[in-house]
Amino acid sequence: MTNLILFGPPGSGKGTQAAKLIDKYNLVHISTGDLFRYEMGNNTPLGLQAKAFMAEGRLVPDEVTIGMLRNKVEAHPEAQGFIFDGFPRTIPQAEALDSLLAEMNTDIAGLIALEVDDEEIVVRVLNRGKSSGRPDDNDEAIIRKRITVYKQETTPVFDYYAEHGKSHSIPGVGSIHDIFERLCMTIDQL
Ligand code: ADP
């Protein structure tokens, strides 16, 4: 199995690149943000739990997120590997992911971070907000809050995998094609 973490701040292009990578490498894409939005759209108890946190740009509590992730992974026993997008976002989530993969006799092959600076992120996410219908994409204060949460709670996950020599980063600016090429080069060297 090849399991990858696509890492980076909100609006860094993880979802766009994941969609291309799953075709090339035959992986299953798991985006916790998409899963939460699906649950919210269906007004499930999980969706209702996540809603307020997402609207404020805060992280959904680890136990909720980890349980949902585990269910999704276990629903794909046929998978040749996973691309995790938007997960893990905290150290406890990274530890839970490592245990889950260890139970399956596999591990994370690598984490790849897309680097995009803060002002570019704000521009991109506000732009996405015009068509995404996501309330958290339409408010600059919420977007900046998400960037702060990313720096405080999520960047330690990069260091966590770096300790095992698994973290890599590439520039997340330029054309979608160029970023994809950079990602593939990095993946092919893992
Ligand atoms: P973006 O990366 O653009 O912020 P996502 O769709 O990945 O968008 O996430 C949107 C929101 O969903 C986050 O701000 C957070 O509230 C919630 N969320 C997504 N993934 C996680 C996670 N792993 N842990 C906690 N909350 C999460």
Image: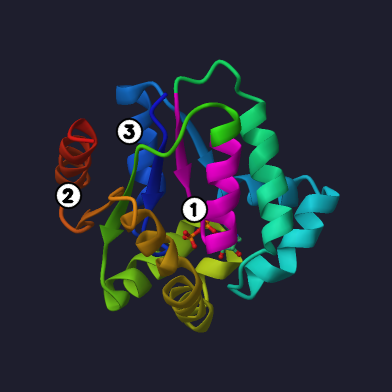
The residue furthest right is 45
- Foreground label between 3 and 2: 3
Mark sitting on residue 175: 2
Q: What residue is at 53 percent from the left and 62 percent from the top?
A: 91
Q: Secondary structure at mark 2?
A: loop
Reply yes or no: does residue 98 show up in magenta: yes
User: How far separated are the C-alphas under marks 3 and 2?
Assistant: 13 Å
- Of residues 84 and 55, the one nearer the viewer is 84
Report whether 162 appears left or right of 99: left
Q: Which residue is mark 1?
A: 86
Q: Residues within 10 Å of mark 2 (few under 14, many from 20)?
A: few
Mark sitting on residue 151: none
Q: Is residue 35 above or below residue 143?
A: above
- Of residues 87 and 117, the one nearer the viewer is 87
Q: Which residues are magenta?
A: 81-101
The quadrant where ligand 1 appears is bottom right
* Type of the residue with mark 3: Lys
